[in-house]
């Protein structure tokens, strides 16, 4: 059973670009984190109905505090990929996302990843999101317990 099976997910479609490859025509590994960021941004916009920009305009930043990626099968130039994103865990002070990078034409899982983010103010001080903006906290938390 997939780690993303019983929670609200959102799929973002992307196509790899030549500039993202190494000399072997394989997508250079740091680009997977860019794909995860694309998935996370669209997930928040589509599943939660709030954009990163909206969150930042409230004075809330989401710096990355942990990352993990397991590379299974290389992505290659011009592959159409699905970034399947979900909120894995959430507390009042942090939020963690899970990702699967899937090759669209055959459904092969190319990578599994996670990022964890702190809720902080513009000065980098931790925020209790439940107290700071109950409305946003509830929107996001609802997706964890979907």
Image (cartoon, rainbow, N blue to C red):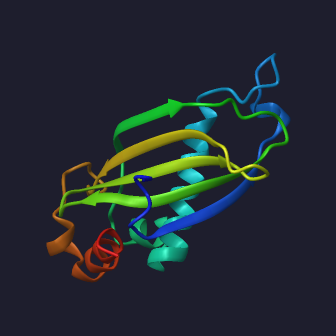
Give the total of numbered labels.
0
Residue at x-position 33% and y-position 49%: 117
Q: Nearer the viewer, residue 130 or 110?
A: 110
Q: Is 10 placed left or right of 107 in the picture?
A: left
* Residue furthest front as drawn: 1
* Residue furthest bottom as drawn: 135
Q: Nearer the viewer, residue 145 or 55?
A: 145
- Decide: is 34 above or below 12: above
Task: Find residue 11 and report its horizontal and vertical position in percent.
Answer: 60, 63
Task: Find residue 27 and report its horizontal and vertical position in percent.
Answer: 72, 30
Task: Tell me the quarter of the image containing the C terminus.
Answer: bottom left
* Residue furthest top as drawn: 23
Residue at x-position 60% and y-position 46%: 101
Q: Nearer the viewer, residue 38 or 26?
A: 26
Q: Is 47 placed left or right of 144 in the picture?
A: right
- Decide: is 121 above or below 136: above
Q: Is 53 placed left or right of 17 in the picture?
A: left
Task: Find residue 119 and report its horizontal and vertical position in percent.
Answer: 27, 57
Task: Find residue 118 and report its horizontal and vertical position in percent.
Answer: 27, 51
């Amino acid at each position: 059973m997939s780690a993303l099976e019983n929670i609200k997910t959102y799929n973002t479609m992307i196509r790899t670009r030549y500039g993202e490859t190494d000399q072997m025509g394989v997508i250079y590994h740091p680009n997977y984190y860019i794909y995860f960021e694309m998935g996370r941004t669209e997930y928040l916009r589509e599943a939660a109905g709030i954009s990163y920009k909206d969150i930042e305009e409230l004075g809330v930043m989401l710096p990355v505090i942990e990352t993990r990626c397991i590379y299974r099968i290389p992505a290659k130039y011009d592959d159409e990929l699905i970034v399947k994103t979900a909120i894995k865990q959430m507390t009042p002070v942090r939020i963690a996302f899970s990702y699967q990078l899937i090759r669209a034409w055959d459904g092969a899982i190319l990578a599994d990843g996670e990022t964890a983010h702190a809720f902080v103010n513009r000065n980098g001080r931790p925020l209790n999101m439940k107290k700071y903006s109950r409305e946003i906290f509830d929107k996001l938390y609802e997706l964890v317990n979907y």
